[in-house]
Amino acid sequence: MAKRIDVSGLNAYYGTHKAIEDISMTVEPRSVTAFIGPSGCGKSTFLRTLNRMHEVTPGGRVEGKVMLDDENLYGSGVDPVAVRRTVGMVFQRPNPFPTMSIYENVVAGVRLNGGRYRKSELDGIVEKSLKGANLWNEVKDRLNKPGAGLSGGQQQRLCIARAIAVEPQVLLMDEPCSALDPISTLAIEDLIGELKERFTIVIVTHNMQQAARVSDRTAFFNLAGVGQPGKLIEIDDTERIFSNPSVQATEDYISGRFG
Amino acid sequence: MEITSATPPGPPPPRKTSRAGDRIFLGLSRGSGILLLVIMAAIAVFLTVRATSALSKNEGDFFTTFEWAANSTPPKFGIAVLAFGTVVSSLIAMLIAVPVAIGIALFISHYAPRKLAAPLSYVIDLLAAVPSIVYGLWGALFLVPHLGGLYTWLNDYFGWTGIFAYQGGAARSLFTIGILLAIMILPIVTSVSREVFLQAPKMHEEAALALGATRWEVIRMSVLPFGRSGVISASMLGLGRALGETMAVATVLSPSFTIGKSLLDPGGGTFAQNIASSFKESGEIGKDALIASGLVLFVLTLLVNGAARLIIARRKEYTA
């Protein structure tokens, strides 16, 4: 179910501005990889190239290769819609569909592209996904209530349930806890630990302790200056990045000397 | 129980100061609010008083009489034909205009490249700037002579329903009025809908995209639910305009006090058209009778607006 991501020579642009330059890395299946780095270093942009969401932004453009096992996501004839079904995404701010109930939110992705299911199948998907997102016990009695009525942390777990309901290979998380309180953050972090049994997880975070807590591998991004493209400085085992990084800039960043 | 005087200890509360600017602004805004109420009340009282005087002299039933002879003695007039014509022509206009307007608004807000979207919305807004008498002239001189083909086609395929039967003759019917009104309300419905669709939150569109939604599915999941109440109010604005449209209808319609079985039958009338057409030749009672019909239009428009507000309020709980 989980696939390996292999990126080589990736550049991304906003119009004429080059946002990230020449990124190559490998993300192992069934692991958590964290992206850290100062604001504007392109880590979110890079994350969004992994499910072809970057090109949705006006002027957004990508060069290079992203291999998901042996399929190039940017190959000719690859449908971005199909890519996004394989590579799920969770956003910074919880974004359940406000007009839909909790139940409908979870099956929103399943029902797309003309997907027709029997009620019993959908019920099964909803229960499995909500259990997978550690939300089932809190909402099982009010599945038909609006998803927007939940607390922020619950909404974010609802979004995770919605993302895993379509059984993706990879789960991308763009600062999933930055709008949440510490208790909800802890709940999401525990959940990430469980989800990596089934999915390849990539998480962007501003919180270095979080990266240290949840990830197996950590990638540090940096940019030379304002207006310069962001670059991958190094990627290594999380323990090594936080104890003995091989690049001086990484050590400066994680020890709080800048950023 | 002992009652103590309520003078709390401690320093006296800061003295209330009043500033000249605040007082002037308060006076102005309160005055405008009161003025609005006074004007509304004055209109309502005027309409009611004059209408009552005409209604007391009416020999026919005001709601069911199929004629308008307010100037003969005794006066006999009824609004059945006018109410039917007004409601039916406006409904036809809504049925045509709202889907088209939603389509244009979605195209401008979500499909068209930016270079095309801006001029296109400008052209749509320009349609709203055309005076209604010009629409009337265009309708009478262009639309009416060119609709024969459409009428024949409708008769061939839908004539069996009765409402699309066509006996030949000039296309000066409620259906033509509906088409004309549709064009006239298109800009307002389009531009309000477009503004609402543009405000659809990006984060919900991205949520749908990231689940693997196609462009249409993104619109269906995130844009349309968000825009629903806005589209309803846009439609009601359009309906309000269609109900009260005067000059264009008066120019195109050949009025008659009959209700045809078919929408394509010539004749019929609307409140506003009847007032415009009959006002000049009316005597004292005739004018009061027209005012009575105007009062009905006033109430009808109020009801439409009230219904729109109800629908929007009911949807509120879902728009977070």
Image (cartoon, coloured by chain):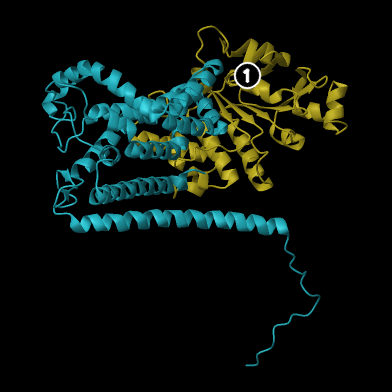
Chain colours: A yellow, B cyan
Locate residue B91: give its quadrant: top left
Residue beneath the point at 38% across and 45% down = B308
Q: Residue A98: x percent and y percent?
A: 49, 40
Task: Please state the total of marks drawn on the protein image.
Answer: 1
Q: Secondary structure at mark 1?
A: helix
Looking at the image, can residue A144 be seen? no
Looking at the image, can residue A170 be seen? yes
Quadrant containing the N terminus of chain B is bottom right
Disc 1: host chain: A
Q: Residues within 10 Å of mark 1 (few under 14, many from 20)?
A: many
Q: Residue furthest bottom?
A: B1
Residue beneath the point at 16% across and 20% down = B157
Horizontal side, residue B192 vs residue B167: left or right: right
Q: Residue B77: x percent and y percent?
A: 17, 48
Q: Residue furthest top?
A: A76
Horizontal side, residue B22 vs residue B134: left or right: right
Nearest to the observer: residue A18 or residue B136: B136
Which amino acid does the dot numbered 1 rest on?
Thr
Locate residue A188: give its quadrant: top right
Q: Residue B226: x percent and y percent?
A: 47, 37
**A244, above or below B32, in the image:** above
Nearest to the observer: residue B44 or residue B216: B44
Residue located beneath label 1 in the image: A49
Q: Residue A195: x percent and y percent?
A: 58, 33
